[in-house]
Image: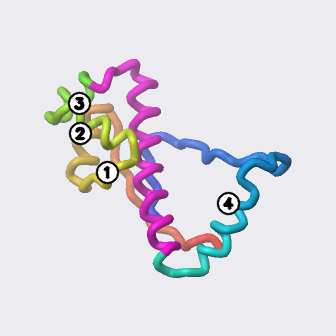
């Protein structure tokens, strides 16, 4: 798993007492046994973690998407895609975003949870 270190963003945790989504959660757990499904979920998790990190860092600085885009040298649309989790940016893009936010990009690898 790759973790973004722009900002330590806590992971949302669903309530154990909330019955909404229980059937979907159970289905999801069974589907994780399929390696292709598990890879797709992991890929989305990385994009989502990056998106949340960029969004939180930008908001903490009181910066608009337009201002961040200008500092990065890209379009508002590109920043919007990054913050939606719908785009997996290159390392060079992440370096430019980190620099524009006054941060350092840190990329690491860790063993998957068991």
Residue 79 pos. (x, y %) = 28, 36
Contact flag, marks 2 and 3 (Cβ < 8 Å): yes
Q: Secondary structure at mark 2?
A: helix
Contact flag, marks 2 and 1 (Cβ < 8 Å): yes
Contact flag, marks 3 and 1 (Cβ < 8 Å): no
Q: Is residue 15 above or below residue 88?
A: above
Mark 4 nearby-residue class (10 Å; few <14, some 14–19, many ≥20): few
Q: Which residue is mark 3?
A: 76
Q: Earlier in the sequence, mark 4 or mark 2?
A: 4
Front position among marks 4 and 1: 4
Tell me the magenta residue range. Answer: 37-65
Q: CA distance from mark 2 to mark 3?
A: 5 Å
Residue at x 81% of width, y 50% of height: 19
Front position among marks 4 and 3: 4
Q: Secondary structure at mark 4?
A: helix
Q: Secondary structure at mark 3?
A: helix
Residue 23 pos. (x, y %) = 73, 61
Q: Secondary structure at mark 1?
A: loop
Q: Which residue is mark 1?
A: 87
Q: Is residue 76 left or right of residue 103?
A: left
Q: Is residue 89 magenta?
A: no
Q: Which residue is mark 2?
A: 78
Which quarter of the image is occupied by the C terminus?
bottom right
Q: Is residue 19 above or below residue 111?
A: above
């Amino acid at each position: 798993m790759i973790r973004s270190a722009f900002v330590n963003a806590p992971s949302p945790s669903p309530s154990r007492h909330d019955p909404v989504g229980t059937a979907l959660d159970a289905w999801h757990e069974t589907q994780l046994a399929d390696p292709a499904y598990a890879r797709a979920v992991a890929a989305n998790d990385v994009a989502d973690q990056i998106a949340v990190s960029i969004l939180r860092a930008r908001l903490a600085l009181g910066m608009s998407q337009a201002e961040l885009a200008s500092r990065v040298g890209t379009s508002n649309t590109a920043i919007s895609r990054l913050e939606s989790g719908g785009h997996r940016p290159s390392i060079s893009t992440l370096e430019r975003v980190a620099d524009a936010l006054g941060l350092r990009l840190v990329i690491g690898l860790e063993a998957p949870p068991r």
